[in-house]
Image (cartoon, rainbow, N blue to C red):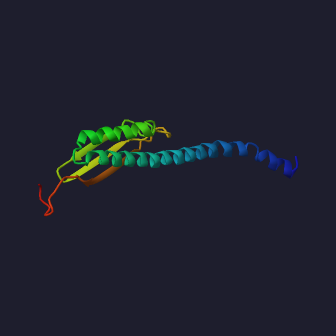
Amino acid sequence: MTASSRRQCGDRGAVSLQLVLVVPLLLLIALLVVQFALVWHARHIAQYAAERGLAAARVEDGTAADGRAQARRSLAALGDRVLIRPSVIVERTATRTTVRVRGPVIRVVPGLTLHAAGTASGPTERVTTATGGQP
């Protein structure tokens, strides 16, 4: 047996072993990229729903229930597959209104649960006099 044939026999199966080790790692990296892109997208959905809920709840005749309903409608319109079972919390006082939307993001990587949230806050609209007091 010559030296070159011995070298060839010693390298047999090396490509298969590298393939078995590298391909799962590459697939995991690809899945992680997709997972974090979905989290980024879900954060934008949650923020949009919170802003829409704030717009409905902060008006003079608005209520916390109006804001919650508008946020839920916005979530439904954008698709409920990315942000799973989102919670909508609306706090409305005489001076400030806050809407929080939060929920888990759909899983692509098994065992990895990530959450996305959006918050919008602003002054509650009310009629005041020129001096700043209530009419």
Q: What x and y, as percent, mark residue 44?
A: 42, 49
Q: Residue at x 48, y 38 (%)?
A: 110
Furthest residue toward right: 2
* 62 displayed left or right of 3: left
* 23 displayed left or right of 10: left
Which residue is at the front of the view, 129 or 21? 129
Q: What x and y, as percent, mark residue 105?
A: 42, 41
Q: What x and y, as percent, mark residue 73?
A: 37, 37
Q: Quadrant of the C terminus?
A: bottom left
Q: What x and y, as percent, mark residue 87?
A: 32, 39
Q: Residue at x 31, y 51 (%)?
A: 120
* 6 displayed left or right of 89: right
Which residue is at the front of the view, 95 or 135? 135
Which residue is at the front of the view, 133 or 124? 133
Q: Residue at x 33, y 40 (%)?
A: 70
Looking at the rendering, which quadrant does residue 78 occupy?
Answer: top left
Q: Residue at x 29, y 45 (%)?
A: 56
How many tags in the picture? 0
Furthest residue toward bottom: 131
Looking at the rendering, which quadrant does residue 13 occupy?
Answer: top right
Which residue is at the front of the view, 77 or 1? 77
